[in-house]
């Protein structure tokens, strides 16, 4: 009997609080920094080329075989513009197959691949499965345009090392 | 009189009611979803139109264009007529329901009796739907509907009758006039509480949605219906909600009178009855969003062991006070005391569940 009154009180206090609903496509919840979307490649702004050297360690460790990587000699190395002898030639990731295990990020020696922490790493519905096989341009797009914000955060303990356009805070630092 | 010719007059009034009430139903479906949403910290419909205001229209179009299915083994005429048997009595009740002092289709004199009598018929429709569907869940639901609606009809009628005793009339307009300075809820709190609970049960809304319980009988009598026939059941439910709410506002809250008994003109009568009926509707929705469904034995026990005896008690109190011509406050005090007693009894019974109790008390203990 008193439970009835208590139930009625509970619902009216709930009604007075703000609704928790987010109107999704128009309003989006902020994703946490370490949100694990699908993997993307990073762009080295200093050498103006991808970090990836095409060493294929990610492809070999990938449990679902979703990656295809080829390597080539880096033309910029011959010109002396880059420290990388080898560079990635072609890179494909089949997003339909990837299971977001994060192993490629763990094994990468060059911090060249990260899990996308933006909504673009999640909202990937396509009409055709083939459209989910991403080539290198698509994989690098977000890093190049700067949309990918701080994929490596403090919890990983990896310092800022040239994977994004330089920020004011970095320039103030003494060499 | 809207027109001189009584036939024309009746036709015009009927037309107004027949358009206004379904419109109110369409709005109510939207309001209900919004209210329940807010009670659960959601927004409710938001996509169709600004703040989802066109959701009800979209739902209506969807229901009207949906395929009207009939199971091959269903009893054809029983199945197809059942929605009409449910919906027609509900609309018949609107004939004499006064919205203002003049605002009814026809003043039938015995309006209260007529409404109670007519609204009982829709039970037949539910049983028909349950039987005609040739589906075990529908049949179970139909049987449950018959059991529940017939059981709760009795305390509802008794509560209404108690009010009619005090008001000395079965005419709804005279009942509203009889409330004068103080509405009947003050003199008849027990009858009001019984009316409220039995009203929710008559509408088979949430704590009492046993006949149509989704998780038990997957929609009960409505399980085989789709499209327009299903929407007729839905319409009947909401029109019934309007009828019960307006009836409650008329006989307990003083209808179109100002709470402290000042007569008001037509311009204010409609807003007043609207506000009072809305209070009932919001309360019904609020209760719906708050309480879990009762078990069928709890529901029946509560009706027959608590509501009905106390409804009779209210009538006896009324008879006593009226015969000896005691002042009104005695009526209010006695009825209030009986309300508290009913509350305490239910409370004690609910708290005795689980403890070893004698079988007689155990039966009362399954009340809530």
Image: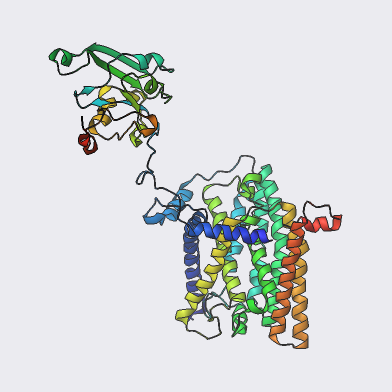
Q: Position of residue B342 (x, y in %)?
A: 74, 68
| Foreground residue among B143 and B176 | B176
| B164 on left or right of B39 | right
Which image quadrant: the C terminus of chain A? top left
| A145 on left or right of B182 | left
Residue drawn at (78%, 51%) of the image: B354
Q: Position of residue B125 (x, y in %)?
A: 65, 56
| Foreground residue among A33 and B42 | A33
Residue drawn at (53%, 53%) of the image: B231
Residue B2 visible within the image: no
Which image quadrant: the N terminus of chain A? bottom right
Residue drawn at (78%, 62%) of the image: B305
| Foreground residue among A33 and A2 | A33
Q: Position of residue B230 (x, y in %)?
A: 55, 50
Q: Quadrant of residue A51?
A: top left
Q: Quadrant of residue B360?
A: bottom right
Q: Quadrant of residue A130?
A: top left
Seen as rendered, the residue at the extreme left is A79
| A23 on left or right of B305 | left
Seen as rendered, the residue at the extreme front is A174
Q: Position of residue A118 (x, y in %)?
A: 34, 35
Residue B91 visible within the image: yes
| Foreground residue among B95 and A54 | A54
Numbered circles on residues, count: 0
């Amino acid at each position: 009997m008193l439970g009835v009154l208590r139930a009625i009180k509970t619902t009216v206090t709930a009604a007075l609080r703000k609704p928790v609903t987010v109107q999704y496509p128009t309003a989006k919840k902020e994703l946490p920094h370490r949100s694990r979307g699908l993997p993307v490649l990073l762009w080295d702004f200093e050498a103006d080329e991808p970090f990836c050297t095409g060493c294929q360690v990610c492809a070999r460790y990938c449990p679902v075989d979703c990656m295809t990587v080829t390597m080539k000699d880096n033309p910029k190395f011959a010109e002396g513009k880059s420290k990388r002898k080898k560079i990635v030639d072609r890179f494909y990731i089949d997003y339909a197959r990837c299971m977001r295990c994060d192993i490629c990020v763990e094994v990468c020696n060059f911090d060249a691949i990260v899990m996308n922490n933006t909504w673009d790493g999640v909202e990937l519905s396509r009409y055709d499965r083939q459209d989910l096989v991403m080539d290198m341009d698509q994989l690098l797009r977000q890093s190049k345009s700067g949309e990918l914000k701080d994929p490596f955060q403090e919890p990983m303990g990896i310092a800022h090392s040239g994977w994004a356009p330089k920020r004011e805070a970095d320039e103030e630092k003494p060499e | 009189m809207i027109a001189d010719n009584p036939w024309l007059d009746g036709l015009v009034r009927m037309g107004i009611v027949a358009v206004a009430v379904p419109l109110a139903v369409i709005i109510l479906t939207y309001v209900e979803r919004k209210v329940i949403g807010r009670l659960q910290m959601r927004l409710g419909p938001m996509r169709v139109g600004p703040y989802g205001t066109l959701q009800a229209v979209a739902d209506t179009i969807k229901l009207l264009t949906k395929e009207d299915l009939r199971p091959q083994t269903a009893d054809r005429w029983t199945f197809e007529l059942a929605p009409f048997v449910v919906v027609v009595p509900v609309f018949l009740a609107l004939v004499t329901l006064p919205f203002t002092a003049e605002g009814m289709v026809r003043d039938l004199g015995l309006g209260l009796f007529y409404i109670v009598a007519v609204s009982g018929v829709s039970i037949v429709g539910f049983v028909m739907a349950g039987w005609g569907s040739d589906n075990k869940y529908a049949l179970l639901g139909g049987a449950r509907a018959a059991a529940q609606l017939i059981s709760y009809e009795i305390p509802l009628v008794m509560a209404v009758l108690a009010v009619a005793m005090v008001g000395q009339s079965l005419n709804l307009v005279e009942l509203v006039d009889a409330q004068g300075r103080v509405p009947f809820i003050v003199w008849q709190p027990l009858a009001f509480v019984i009316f409220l609970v039995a009203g929710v049960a008559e509408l088979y809304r949430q704590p009492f949605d046993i006949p149509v319980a989704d998780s038990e009988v997957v929609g009960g009598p409505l399980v085989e219906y789709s499209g327009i026939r299903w929407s007729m059941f839905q319409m009947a439910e909401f029109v019934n909600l309007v009828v019960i709410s307006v009836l409650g506002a008329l006989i307990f809250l003083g209808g179109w009178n100002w709470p402290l008994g000042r007569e008001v003109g037509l311009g204010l009568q409609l807003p007043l009855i609207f506000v009072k009926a809305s209070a009932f509707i919001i309360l019904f929705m609020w209760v719906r969003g708050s309480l879990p469904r009762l078990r069928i034995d709890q529901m029946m026990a509560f009706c027959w062991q608590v509501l009905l005896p106390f409804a009779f008690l209210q009538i006896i109190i009324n008879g006593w006070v009226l015969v000896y011509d005691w002042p009104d406050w005695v009526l209010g005090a006695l009825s209030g005391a009986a309300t508290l007693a009913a509350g305490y009894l239910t409370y004690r019974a609910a708290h005795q569940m689980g403890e070893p109790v004698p079988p007689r008390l155990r039966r009362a203990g399954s009340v809530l």
